[in-house]
Image: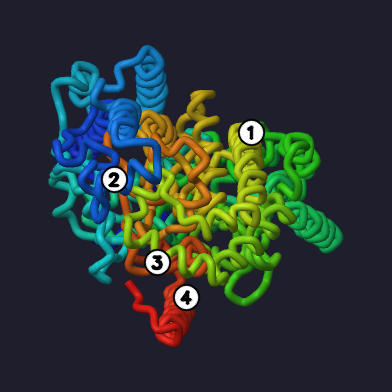
């Protein structure tokens, strides 16, 4: 099909009445599927009997006699009592999580989703000419009577890293199976135009919410289009909207220089400053109308004419203020000074824009429709705030969160001292012989190792406390739209994951749904029990990934004084909650300190979007060198690597 841009005035110029009906049905089915997936979160999954105990007694006692435990702990009877208590508290899913608090959370989730879904379909009807029979059909349709094919997408996914064939499109198909539709048989050019149109319709809501992007991911899958179509569209639309605002605002050189200087100063202040720059620096805070011709000309690459683009965008095509709000200006009023007022109890709290591949800072023209924030968990150098996140592609607007620089540096130095000590290397061998869980739950720590506790316990305790506070501050910033009306993805390791956990728990408590698109938690020092992860899952619209390693003896040791009866997410898979991905990275993460060097490798292997493979290759090379060095050191001491 070859449709000239100027001929495409609205969606009815692209598809006929029957295809419009099919599109409405497909969008309805996708939202039904999303609602079913939301419902699945609150349904306890089937748990095999063998997996119901957090630490099976036979596993914990492997290699030890009853007398061994009696002499080292407090007696066999007390051990059994400990396990009985653990089973009761660790698996609240056995009680179906049927508490009033859970029920209220479920009701609030559905209330938000149904309002969002109604708004989406209303804008679809407004943007395109929907046959009357379709509207009546939609009005009569009940969620409970029509459930699209899910293909086990509600089950917890456990992915092993024995395959290196993970790519974003493979993961797209696996986690978002296509819904059957006759539209998938249309020529690709026509399917792409349909997709373009739906993206613009969703933006006509004047916000790009996390569930809107999940809808688009499902639409991409159902139309049999590659994920790149969605990513490239997002970039094109972001650049076009901001380009149109800049074009309307004037082109005088003095004004241009003033804008650039203003934006440059704001960038240094972080994400909140960028929020102000998006509109104030471009329009002076005034609402300049975006002429349809300008929008259409700049967006010509989408294959839609000016009239079609303006019509599909609705009010967003009429106001620079709305465009600025989308990218983080009005509504939020989050200046850097305002973030400072939130962060009184945490030092160094700021968002640092990641540099592009050519070494230059992200400019205003490089804004994206999505925001990704990487959170480091300890530091040995100030550059460690940014370095772990260099593998994240610029298809999303990437920031590194700088927080508690001094405390995290002290912790990093302490962890390195312990990891390099002879006492730790000897103790590690003894821990391995017992299994990590027996040492954790039953406090079977070698005396030589306990002597090192004074080195790390205090720095870790300080950082745990401040991570919880910083997480609440991050939640405040997100709720107040420092990122604008754009979905946020959060990725963190170690105490960075703890910070994100605190943020998500705060969002859940305040019922701030639809803001978070995806989350990856690596080596997280947080509980693994179902009640906690149900709350986390409720505020994440897309993927929620728990990355763990059974080789993380340092994490087990650091977490030993906390509520270990609720499990440790960084050491095990999450059970009892649907739609949580568990990624076992024991093969590449030999210890807690490896996460900082393996972020890109892990993200690439789980099929995360838009990863710089050249950075991943460098990470893997570094990890291989370190592993070889460790093996040589062990061999020199005559010890065997287990």
N-terminal-most mark, 1 or 2: 2
Q: Which residue is pictured at 41% across the width and 32% down the height?
A: 532
Q: Is residue 240 visible?
A: no
> Dot 2 corresponds to which residue?
67
| Location of residue 337 by image quarter | top right
Return the mark for residue 476. 1
N-terminal-most mark, 3 or 4: 3
Residue 172 versus residue 288 in the image, above or below: below
Is 181 left, or right, of 416 in this rendering?
A: left
What count of labels does the image hold?
Answer: 4
Name the foreground residue: 161 vs 459: 459
Is 493 left, or right, of 340 in this rendering?
A: left
Give the x, y percent position of residue 541. Answer: 39, 38
Is 291 left, or right, of 78 in this rendering?
A: right
Judge depth for marks 2 and 4 and give the one in front.
Answer: 2
Judge depth for marks 2 and 3 and give the one in front.
Answer: 2
> Dot 4 corresponds to which residue?
619
> Dot 3 corresponds to which residue?
429
Residue situated furthest right in the rendering: 254
Question: Badge 2: few (under 14), some or many (20 or more) residues near its Cα, within 10 Å?
Answer: few
Name the foreground residue: 286 vs 92: 92
């Amino acid at each position: 099909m070859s449709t000239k841009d100027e001929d495409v005035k609205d969606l009815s110029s692209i598809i006929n009445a029957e295809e419009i009906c099919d599109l409405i049905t497909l969008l309805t089915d996708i939202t039904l599927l999303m609602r079913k997936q939301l419902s699945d979160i609150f349904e306890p999954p089937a748990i095999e009997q063998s997996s119901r105990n957090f630490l099976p007694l036979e596993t914990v006692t492997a290699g030890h006699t009853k007398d061994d435990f009696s002499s080292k702990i407090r007696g066999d009877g007390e051990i059994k009592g400990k396990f009985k208590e653990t089973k009761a508290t660790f698996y609240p899913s056995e009680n179906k999580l049927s508490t009033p608090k859970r029920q209220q959370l479920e009701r609030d989730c559905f209330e938000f989703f149904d309002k969002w879904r109604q708004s989406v379909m209303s804008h679809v009807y407004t943007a395109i000419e929907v046959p009357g029979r379709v509207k009546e059909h939609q009005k009569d349709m009940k969620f409970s009577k029509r459930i699209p094919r899910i293909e086990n997408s509600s089950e917890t996914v456990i992915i092993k890293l024995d395959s290196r064939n993970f790519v974003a499109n493979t993961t797209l198909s696996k986690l978002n199976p296509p819904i059957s539709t006759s539209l998938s048989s249309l020529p690709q050019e026509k399917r792409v135009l349909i997709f373009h149109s739906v993206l613009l319709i969703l933006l006509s809501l004047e916000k790009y919410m996390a569930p809107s992007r999940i809808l688009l991911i499902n639409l991409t899958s159902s139309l049999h289009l590659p994920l790149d179509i969605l990513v490239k569209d997002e970039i094109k639309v972001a650049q076009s909207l901001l380009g149109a605002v800049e074009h309307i605002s004037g082109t005088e050189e003095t004004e241009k220089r003033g804008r650039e200087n203003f934006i440059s100063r704001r960038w240094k202040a972080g994400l909140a400053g960028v929020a102000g720059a998006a509109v104030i620096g471009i329009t002076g805070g005034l609402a300049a109308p975006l002429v349809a011709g300008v929008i259409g000309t700049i967006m010509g690459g989408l294959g839609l004419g000016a009239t079609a683009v303006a019509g599909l965008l609705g009010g967003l095509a009429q106001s620079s203020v709305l465009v600025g709000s989308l990218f983080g200006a009005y509504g939020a009023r989050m200046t850097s000074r305002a973030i400072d007022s939130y962060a009184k109890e945490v030092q160094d709290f700021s968002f640092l824009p990641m540099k592009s591949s050519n070494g230059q800072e992200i400019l205003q023209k490089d804004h994206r429709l999505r925001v990704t924030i990487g959170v480091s968990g300890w530091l040995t150098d100030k550059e460690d705030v940014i370095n772990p996140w260099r593998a994240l592609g610029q298809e999303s607007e990437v920031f590194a969160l700088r927080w508690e620089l001094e405390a995290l540096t002290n912790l990093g130095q302490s962890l390195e001292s312990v990891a390099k000590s002879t006492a730790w290397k000897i103790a590690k061998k003894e821990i391995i012989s017992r299994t990590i869980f027996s040492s954790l739950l039953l406090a079977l720590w070698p005396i030589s190792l306990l002597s090192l506790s004074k080195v790390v316990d205090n720095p870790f305790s300080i950082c745990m406390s401040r991570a919880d506070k910083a997480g609440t501050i991050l939640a405040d910033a997100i709720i107040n739209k420092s990122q604008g009306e754009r979905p946020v993805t959060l990725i963190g390791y170690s105490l960075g994951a703890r910070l994100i956990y605190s943020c998500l728990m705060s969002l859940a408590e305040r019922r701030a749904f639809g803001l978070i698109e995806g989350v990856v938690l690596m080596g997280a020092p947080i509980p693994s029990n179902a009640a906690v992860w149900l709350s986390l899952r409720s505020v994440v619209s897309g993927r929620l990934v728990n990355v763990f390693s059974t080789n993380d003896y340092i994490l087990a040791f650091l977490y030993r004084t906390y509520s270990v009866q609720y499990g440790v997410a960084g050491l095990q898979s999450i059970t009892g909650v649907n739609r949580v991905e568990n990624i076992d990275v024991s093969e590449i993460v030999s210890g807690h300190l490896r996460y900082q060097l393996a972020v890109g490798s892990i993200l690439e292997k789980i099929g995360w979007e838009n990863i710089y493979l050249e950075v991943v290759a460098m990470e893997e090379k570094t990890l291989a060198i370190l592993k070889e060095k460790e093996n040589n050191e062990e061999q020199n001491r005559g010890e065997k690597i287990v």
